[in-house]
Image (cartoon, rainbow, N blue to C red):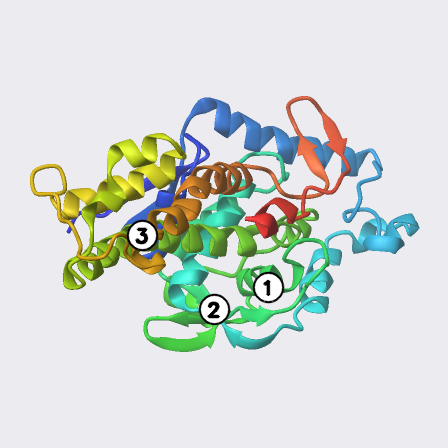
Amino acid sequence: MTTSIIAFGGRPLTIKDVVEIANGKAQAALSDAPEFVEKVDAGVRFLDELLEQDGVIYGVTTGYGDSCTVTVPENLVNELPIHLTRFHGCGLGDTFDEQETRAILAARLSSLAQGYSGVSWELLERLVVMLNENMLPLIPKEGSVGASGDLTPLSYIAGALIGERDVRFRDKVMNSAEAFKELGMSVHKLRPKEGLAIMNGTAVMTALACLAWDRAEYITRLSSRITSLASIALEGNSNHFDDLLFAVKPHKGQQQVASWIQQDLNHVEHPRNSSRLQDRYSIRCAPHVIGVLKDSLPWFQETIENELNSANDNPIIDGLGEHVLHGGHFYGGHIAMV
């Protein structure tokens, strides 16, 4: 089977891209588009210049949260992100499975590859290696509810990058430093902004939303097919799915579901008439019930893919324009609504 390559930093990612990576049907790569390369380089350069000039950057030269008024001494700036990853490593419960973890890595890589997080090529490349080599951090499912995005679960990715967390690798659970060593690589040394950049965002919820959307899209087709089988088994009335009937309540998704069922029943050529005037709700109203989901999926998709291709981080580093923008893009309300 040929494995496709999905380039991050080039075209916008789709739900399908994330699902393919999650299912091991595609590998990750970084785009070599000149504008992408320059955006990443500019972000790193700009951060370095600000640090040389004693610039004030949240989470880089200041503390976190309410401690944003506390100045971090220059000699501790490089140590700060390490402590951030340790501080949030308090997750509980089961760990995400391999499919979910690959999706999470892909979603975080997508955000960082927008070029507005001030991260280095080395960090982006390490995430690509972890995806393609199937080096998957053990990420607890519980933690960070109501906090800045997915801080706790994403801290386990940051911790794995620096050699302080366990990963699944080559059918074993081991410390990430050992896994990197098996690949002939050293652990990553976080730059000043990188701990925050990995952790402060919506990658976990967005990744799970991608997988949920894919299941939901499949369920619309599966449940329509099961309705067809049930109608046949009960010798139902195929007129319940007629085009004319659904033309007068024209929700597109609902019409599509009715069309799928009538095609299964071969309604146009061989309409079936039940001994009952009307079949029971579970058959007759199936397009109306399934159609609600079918009609919602396009909006869900737009919202998920918008988040997937966003810089859901804080602060935002505009290297080309030389701006540091402080806000709340780690907030996950749109994904929670989906």
Q: What SS does tag 1 mark?
A: helix
What is the distance, in whole Å, between disc 1 and disc 3 at their CAs?
A: 44 Å
Q: Nearer the viewer, mark 2 or mark 3?
A: 3
Residue type at mark 1 is Pro
Residue 147 versus residue 239: which sits nearer the camera?
Answer: 239
Q: What SS does tag 2 mark?
A: loop
Q: Earlier in the sequence, mark 1 or mark 3?
A: 1
Residue type at mark 3 is Arg
**Quadrant in which residue 100 is drawn:** bottom left
Circles 2 and 3, Cβ within 8 Å, touching? The answer is: no
Q: Which mark is residue 284?
A: 3
Residue type at mark 2 is Phe
Q: Which mark is residue 153?
A: 1
- What residue is at 45 percent from the left and 62 percent from the top? 101
Whether residue 199 sits left or right of residue 263 in the image: it is right
Q: Earlier in the sequence, mark 2 or mark 3?
A: 2
- What residue is at 19 percent from the left and 43 percent from the top? 262
Residue 24 visible somewhere in the drawing: no
Q: What SS does tag 3 mark?
A: helix
Q: Residue furthest right?
A: 69
Mark 1: few/some/many CA within 10 Å (<14, 14-19, 20+): many
Q: Find residue 305 and report its horizontal and vertical position in percent.
A: 48, 39
Whether residue 233 sits left or right of residue 76 in the image: it is left
- What residue is at 44 percent from the left and 50 percent from the top? 210
Q: Earlier in the sequence, mark 1 or mark 2?
A: 2
Whether residue 179 sits left or right of residue 330 in the image: it is left
Q: Nearer the viewer, mark 1 or mark 3?
A: 3
Q: Is residue 248 above or below residue 328?
A: above
What is the distance, in whole Å, between disc 1 and disc 2 at their CAs?
A: 10 Å
Q: Is residue 12 above or below residue 335?
A: above
- Judging by the rendered image, the residue that carries numbered circle 2 is 96
